[in-house]
Amino acid sequence: MTTYLVTGGAGFIGSNFVRHLLTSEPDCRVVNLDKLTYAGNLGNLADLAENTRYRFVEGDICDRDLLEVLFTKEQFSAVVHFAAESHVDRSIHGPAEFIQTNIIGTFALLETARKYFESGQNQNFRFLHVSTDEVYGSLGETGLFSETTPYDPHSPYSASKASSDHLVSAYFHTYGLPTLMTNCSNNYGPYQFPEKLIPLIINNALQGKELPVYGDGKNVRDWLYVVDHCQAILTVLKSGRLGETYNVGGNSEKQNIEVVHTICDILDEVASPLPDNSSRRSLIRFVTDRPGHDRRYAIDASKIKNELGWEPTVDFSGGIRETVEWYLTNPEWVEAILSGSYRDYYDKMYKDR
Ligand code: NAD
Ligand code: DAU
C-alpha cells in the first residue's frame, strides 16, 4: 500500500489535498503531520475522523526525532510538503517563525528523507516541495514567471520559501534525493484562513465591516481554485521529471479591486441585504499599503501543460461563486476562527492602517 506523508495537512491547501488524495487513490494511506499553529485546524478534516486510511500526527517538522520515528514506522512512499508559515503580512511583523519553519523545518525534513532514501528502504521514494510564485519577485505590466525566471524574493515570507526551494534543489543535485517542486500562484477556495484577501473580504462584507484594500488596489494576482492546485501537485508527483520545478497558475490575472468588487456583487445578490440596503461596494476602504508590496504576479504554466497535460479546470467566475457559497453555508467553521485569536490579529494589523 502507498503511504504518503503530508506535512501541514491541517491548513488550507494541505487539507484540500489530503481529501483529494484519499478520494483519487482508494488504496493509499495518508499520514498528516501538522503542528496546529493558528492556521492549522482539525475542523478542516472533520469528515475524515473515522477514515481508517488517514492518520493525524500533531507535531513540528523541525522535530528530527519525531520525523525519524515516523519514517521508520510508516515507510513512506512520498512526502508532500506543505507545512509553512504562509502569510506575507505576518512575516513582516514577525519573521522569526518563517525562518524557523520554512527554512529549518524544510531542512529537517530533507535530512530525514535523505537518510531514509539512502538506507535503501524505498527506491521509488519521492519528495515534493510545495512552493510559491512569490520567490520570483514582482512583474511589471507585462511578462510572466517561468521556471527559469531568476529568484528575487521581497518579503521575509518569500525569502524563506526561496531559501527552502534552494535547499530542495541542492538535495537533488548533491545527494540525488528524488525531489520535485511546484511554484504556484494565489489559491482560493474552501477552508482558507480569513487573514487572506478573499476570505477576509467575504467575511467582512457579510458582517457589514470595512473592506481594507491595500494601496491603490491595482496589484495583480493570478488566482487558482485550490482543487486545481491539488490536482497539479498529484500530477507532478505521479509523472513529473525528478529534480524539476513546475510552475502552476490559473491563467486568471485580476486586480485586487476587481476581486473585491466581484465578491461584493455576489454577496449583494445571494446574501441578506445590509441594514441600510446599500451595496457592499460602499464598505471598501483604501488603506496604507503593505511594505514591499509586489505589484504583479502572473504564471506561465506551459511546462506543466505541455509535459504533463495539467490545466486549470475551474474558471474564476465559477470558483469565486462556489467559494462565497461555501463560506455562507459553513458559518460554524468561520465563527470558530473569528471568535479566537484572529480578533487580536485583526486589530493589530488593521486598527491604525
Ligand atoms: P496555511 O497557513 O493555511 O497552512 C499551513 C499549515 O502548516 C497549517 O496547518 C499549520 O499548522 C502547519 N504548520 C505550520 N508550521 C508547522 C510546523 N513547524 N510543523 C508542522 N506543521 C506546521 O498555508 P496554505 O495557504 O495552505 O499553504 C500551504 C503551502 O502552500 C505553503 O508551503 C505555502 O507556501 C504554499 N503556497 C500557498 C499558496 C496560497 O495561495 N495559499 C500559493 C502557493 C504556494
Ligand atoms: O502567490 C502565492 C502566494 O499567495 C502564497 O505563496 C501565499 O502563501 C499567499 O498568502 C498569497 O500571498 P499574497 O500576499 O498574494 O496573498 P494575500 O491574500 O495576503 O493578498 C492578496 C493581495 O491582496 C495582495 O496584493 C495584498 C492584497 N490585500 C490583502 C489583504 C489581506 C489587500 O488589499 N487587503 C487585505 O486585507
Image (cartoon, rainbow, N blue to C red):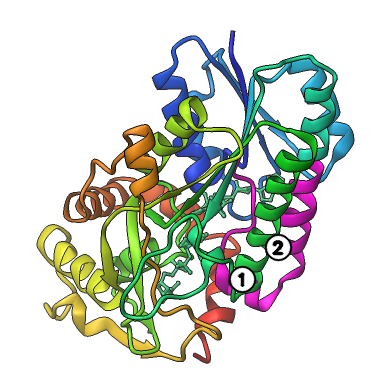
Q: Looking at the rendering, in which quadrant would you find the N terminus?
A: top right
The verdict on residue 61 being magenta is no
When the figure is inspected, residue 39 is found, relative to residue 96, above or below; the finding is: above
Which dot marks residue 183?
none
Position of 210 with respect to 268 (left or right) is: right
Task: Name the residue type under label 2.
Answer: Phe
- Measured as percent of width and height from the top left, residue 49 is found at 54, 24
Q: Quadrant of residue 275?
A: bottom left
- SS for dot 1: helix
SS majority, magenta? helix
The verdict on residue 98 being magenta is yes
When the figure is inspected, residue 279 is found, relative to residue 243, above or below; the finding is: below
The reply to whether discs 2 and 1 touch (Cβ–Cβ < 8 Å) is: yes
Mark 1 = which residue? Answer: 90
The magenta region covers: 81-108
Q: Is mark 2 within 8 Å of ligand 1?
A: no
